[in-house]
Image (tube, rainbow, N blue to C red):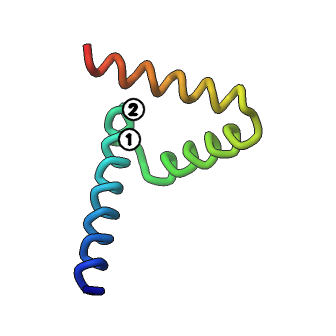
Amino acid sequence: MDRARRSDDRKKDTREKIQLGGLIVKAGLRYEKRALLLGMLIDAAERARASEAERERFAAIGTKAFSDERE
């Protein structure tokens, strides 16, 4: 039972990582260096934590990108 739960947890974790990687591709950053990507994400996370307006701005950009995908 525990083994099956761990396997399910690993599959869920793997799927989540693949989806997150897809976001990097969707953002047009597939070929950027990992250090740059991490730096960008850290900076954006700090900005989002510091400002609700910035958080909303980021969400609006992401929402638009997802809606453009469906068209």
Image quarter for residue 23?
top left
The N terminus - image quarter = bottom left
Q: Is residue 59 depicted above or below 12 in this figure?
A: above
Residue name at image x 32 percent, y 38 percent: 25
| In-image side of 48 versus 36 (left or right) | right
SS label for mark 2: loop
Nearer the observer, 12 or 2? 2
Measured from the top left, where is residue 61 in percent x and y? 50, 23
| In-image side of 22 versus 64 (left or right) | left
Distance, label 2 to label 1, CA atoms, is 5 Å
Residue at the disc numbered 1: 24
In the image as oriented, which residue stretches furthest toward the bottom?
Answer: 2
Residue name at image x 46 percent, y 27 percent: 62
Measured from the top left, where is residue 5 in percent x and y? 29, 77
Measured from the top left, where is residue 18 in percent x and y? 29, 52
User: Which numbered tag is attached to residue 27?
Assistant: 2
The amino acid type found where label 1 is placed reads: Ile
Q: Is residue 48 depicted above or below 14 in this figure?
A: above
Residue name at image x 63 percent, y 45 percent: 45
User: Which numbered tag is attached to residue 3?
Assistant: none
The amino acid type found where label 2 is placed reads: Ala
SS label for mark 1: helix
